[in-house]
Amino acid sequence: MKKDYHFLFQSKIFFILFLTGFLLGSSVPQSFANVTARTSSTLSQTELEIWNDPSFKKQFAQSYMAETDIEPRVTVSEREQMQKILNFISSDRMDKAVKFIEKYRGEDGNALFDFTLANIFFQQEKYEQAAEVYQVAVQKYPKFRCAWRNLGLIYVRQSEYEKALPALSKVIELGGGDALTYGLLGFAYSSVENNLSAETSYRMAVLLDPKIMDWKMGLARSLFKQQRYAEAVALCGNLIAEHPNRADLWLLQANAYIGLSQPLKAAENYEFVDRLGKATFDSLNMLGDIYINQELYEMAVSSYIRALERAQNRNPDRALRAARVLTSRAPLDQPRLLLERIETLYADRLETEARKDILKLKARIAVAEGSGDDEARVLKEIVALDPLDGEALILLGQHAVRSGETEQAIFYYERASGIEGSEAVAKLRHAQLLVSKGRYSDALPLIRRAQFLSPRDDVQKYLEQVERVAKER
């Protein structure tokens, strides 16, 4: 070890002597000059400009300062004052310590006093006050690494990530690049959606302390956010091998599988999370969505029901949307089962719109099964809930037409035509009924009004056909 120091010492002397000789105009050894020339010839114009940049010259000059100079130096008098302050703190007399510090905190006061006061505020969870005083400390002494670190910690704790970034970066610039600082820097970058920088920071944190799981998870999430799904899957796989009971790892890998268009692999992960007893309302709904898209309808309904049972305080809208899809795609016993379970679990807690949605879906199922009486009963329940539901009134009109109740059908159509958003469809249905009865002239004004409100090519052709027939008569 002594030989190493001796070599470094000799090297510094040689470098200083070389600079001295160069400034005094003495000649440079030819062999060294040749090496310098060859090296210089490979520099780009940009690199050459760096050497002339004033900020570079300033940083180079500062590099001669001791790197250990990261805390303010104290005089003998200041050391005695600090000892008194520390005595107050150790005896839990914080108010005394604060008052004593305030005496020495002037513009010319040592930054160490500001730092100590900020630490007291930090300990008392007075974060805004602490941050203000840490700022004073680093303004007085810009290389105060501990002050920069604590300032960064406060900003992260307060979710002020834009402010945390320069503070934590300064800590690293001053040689404080430990795992915690890199990890928090990665977290801050991730929080402001700078995912590439977050990845770099997390990699450094993992390199310096591979035991901390938070940094590995942060790295995996940063890869996922960059849509580097294959890498995220691979990293999660390695972490799952070490921590098989961590649901967050399984869920993150599942999301990455979805990004890779491998939904069934994602489904396996979601099912395993459920076996761990850690499935969430969202994960089970996602599982249901996957099964619907794969036409595994029975498994989809099971997933949606499990989601509802896990979080009955959550809105059932997602399950209702699934029921609509199932009604048009799946065997009717599946959407019926899901609707019945929603009604059982939520009972009187269902809002009016949700109740109406359920009733409309039941009406569709009844129509598909040819049960006209059930359809009419359900539709009347909808109208009882909301007399201004134009869609339900139109469906009741259609049911009356099928039942041969013409006047009742016209009554429903006329009610619906007076409701905003339903007039065009209601008048067209009314006109079609009149045409079926041979009342072409009566139907024409209704068709024209429907076409005016909602122009459609098929309605225009229908209008022209009815006009021709009406003229012939």
Image: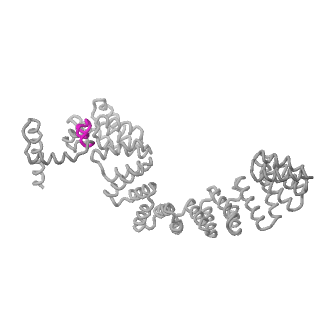
Relative to 194, residue 116 above or below: above
* Count of numbered badges drawn on the protein: 0
The residue drawn where x is 63% and y is 68% is 297
Q: Which stretch appears magenta?
A: 46-57
Near-viewer residue (21 or 152): 21
* Image position of 386 with respect to 88: above or below: below
Question: As drawn, which residue projects farthest toward the right?
Answer: 473
For residue 379, side relative to residue 314 (left or right): right
Q: Compare residues 310 and 264 and report the one nearer the observer.
A: 264
Q: How is the image coloured?
A: one colour
Q: Is residue 177 above or below residue 261?
A: above
Q: Which quarter of the image is occupied by the N terminus?
A: bottom left
Residue at point 75% right, 47% down?
454
Residue at coordinates 12% horizontally, 51% vertically from top-left? 5
Residue 169 sits in quarter: top left
Across and down, in percent, residue 286 comes to: 57, 61
Q: Is residue 66 above or below residue 202?
A: above
Image point (21%, 35%), residue name: 75
**Res. 119 image quadrant:** top left
Confirm whether residue 79 shows in the render: no
In the rendered image, which quarter is residue 151 located in?
Answer: top left
Q: Position of residue 299 (x, y in %)?
A: 61, 69
**What is the x, y in percent for residue 36?**
15, 46
Instruction: From the viewer's side, name the closer residue of 172 and 100.
Output: 172
Q: Position of residue 184 (x, y in %)?
A: 38, 50
Q: Is 157 on the left-hand or right-hand side of 324?
A: left
* Residue 392 within the segment the image draws in magenta: no
Would residue 130 be found to the left or right of residue 459 on screen? left
Q: Main secondary structure of the magenta part?
A: helix
Q: Is residue 29 left or right of residue 55?
A: left
